[in-house]
Image (cartoon, grey):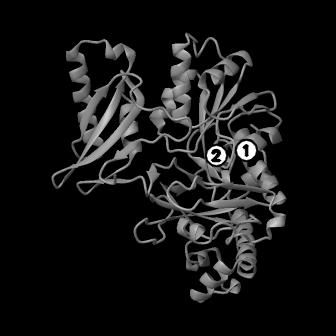
């Protein structure tokens, strides 16, 4: 097995010693360079010398997305702009864009972190990779691109969209590694089938590296069966570095967090109280090596759990589960907390149902109601009414069992649910419209 960096296999005590040294350095670094952090730490009665153990990190106040917006565009940068060689940002559709910057050293670190999960997924310099993430201000495209080149992989930087061309290149160029969001990859599969391409016979694909949105184990099974590949998850977010915070190995049992560069904590999303390893809550990340834009205790909004276990790949770092959703994606329907990933897990386990779905939430009188629009496969679409009715009943029963409440189910024609070339929009909440 191949491991990109020996730090991925350090004993736990050495990792923690390394983290403490870097944490003390980075707290001092931001205190002296970023007025926002000096003000925040002073208000909490902390000095850099207050950090004597890793447990002292819990004394440091959180950083949030609102802090990025309040300091738009460069107020959280720790270096002059002339030292920044790359800027990425969010779209800003829900407020001021989140702007992030990288020094030359940050870019080198980023390449190597992405290379770690690429190699962990078994990708080598012999592979040809098609990057279907968007290139531009979004970190996904460039993040994967430079990591792949670092490993020596041949890269096809096609970006997202123009799906028929994606299909042609995959087939004609003998692409072996596909990269994108899982929802877009399933859309590519639909287009291929419509073009008469046999996904198993006509392609050379063997690995998929997917991320940028929550996806379930059943979604993984669907993709692996459709393409006859191994599909691996990876995790990152622009505010922290982009892709390269964590990634899966061949064991496909949790993502290894690159602990020599990040400290991960789990907190109660409502109270902010620290939760023990193994409990599910909101992921909080601290960067240890970023130069241009370090962050202390950033509340990611992603719901997951972290845990330590011996892994057959030989890596020793702490792991995180696939996020089951985001704090801002969670729906509260009649007092019940629901994540779209719970719905996806059910639908992807039922034969005759496509993985494309939409959740529609509305209010009837004083009561919240939820309906799941489920696309039928072509075969089920032409089946008799009785079979369709039985399918609806089965989906409704299984959703009630998982969600703990009754929801409506509507079967819709193939192609009804709008396809995404990036992150899928699963919920239409008419209560907020």
Q: Residue at x 50, y 50 (%)?
A: 323
Instruction: Determine the secondary structure under disc 1.
Output: helix
Q: Nearer the viewer, mark 2 or mark 1?
A: 1
For mark 2, does the 10 Å Cα neighbourhood hold few (<14), some (14 to 19), or many (20 or more) residues?
Answer: many
Residue 200 location (% of width, % of height) = 59, 15
Q: CA distance from mark 2 to mark 1?
A: 17 Å
Tell me the tag on residue 247: 2
Q: Is residue 174 visible to us here?
A: yes
The residue that appears at 56% across and 56% down in the rendered structure is: 92
**Residue named by callout 1:** 142
**301 or 16: nearer the viewer:** 301
Q: Residues within 10 Å of mark 1 (few under 14, many from 20)?
A: many
Task: Give the quarter of the image for residue 65.
Answer: bottom right
**Nearest the camera: 220 or 193?**
193
Which of these two is toward me, 343 or 378?
Answer: 378
Contact between marks 2 and 1 (CB within 8 A): the answer is no
Residue 44 in the image: state x and y as whole percent.
57, 86
Residue sitting at the far left: 365
């Amino acid at each position: 097995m191949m491991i990109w960096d020996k730090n991925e296999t350090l004993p736990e005590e050495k990792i923690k010693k390394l983290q403490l040294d870097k944490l003390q350095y980075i707290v001092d670094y931001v205190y002296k360079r970023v007025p926002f952090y000096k003000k925040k730490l002073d208000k909490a009665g902390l000095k850099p010398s207050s950090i004597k153990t890793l447990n002292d990190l819990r004394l440091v106040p959180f950083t949030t997305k609102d802090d990025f917006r309040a300091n738009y565009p460069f107020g959280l940068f720790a270096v002059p702009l002339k030292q920044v060689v790359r800027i990425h940002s969010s779209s800003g559709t829900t407020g001021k864009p989140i702007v992030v910057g990288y020094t030359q050293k940050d870019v080198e670190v980023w390449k190597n972190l992405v290379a770690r999960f690429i190699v962990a997924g078994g990708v080598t310099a012999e592979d040809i990779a098609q990057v279907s993430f968007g290139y531009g201000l979004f970190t996904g495209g460039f993040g994967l691109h430079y990591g792949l080149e670092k490993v020596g992989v041949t890269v096809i930087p096609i970006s997202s969209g123009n799906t028929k061309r994606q299909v042609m290149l995959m087939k004609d160029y003998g692409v072996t590694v596909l990269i994108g969001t899982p929802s877009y990859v399933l859309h590519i599969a639909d287009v291929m089938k419509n073009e008469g391409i046999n996904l198993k016979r006509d392609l050379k694909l063997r690995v998929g590296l997917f991320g940028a949105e929550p996806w379930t184990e059943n979604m993984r099974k669907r993709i692996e069966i459709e393409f006859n590949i191994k599909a691996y998850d990876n995790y990152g977010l622009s505010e922290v570095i982009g892709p390269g915070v964590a990634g899966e190995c061949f064991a496909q049992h949790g993502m290894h967090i690159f602990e020599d560069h990040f400290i991960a904590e789990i907190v109660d999303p409502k109270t902010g109280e620290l939760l023990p390893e193994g409990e599910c809550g909101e992921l909080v990340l601290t960067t240890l090596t970023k130069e241009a834009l370090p962050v202390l205790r950033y509340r990611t909004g992603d719901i997951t759990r972290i845990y330590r276990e011996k892994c057959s790949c030989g890596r020793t770092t702490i792991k995180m589960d696939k996020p089951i959703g985001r704090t801002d994606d969670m729906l509260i329907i009649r007092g019940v907390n629901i994540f779209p990933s719970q719905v996806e897990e059910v639908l992807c386990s039922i034969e005759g149902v496509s993985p494309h779905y939409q959740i529609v939430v509305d209010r009837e009188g004083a009561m919240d109601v939820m309906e799941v629009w489920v696309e039928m496969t072509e075969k089920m679409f032409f089946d008799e009414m009785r079979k369709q009715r039985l399918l609806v009943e089965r989906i409704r029963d299984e959703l009630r069992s998982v969600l703990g409440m009754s929801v409506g189910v509507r079967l819709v024609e193939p192609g009804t649910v709008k396809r995404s070339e990036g992150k899928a929009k699963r919920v239409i909440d008419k209560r907020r419209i």
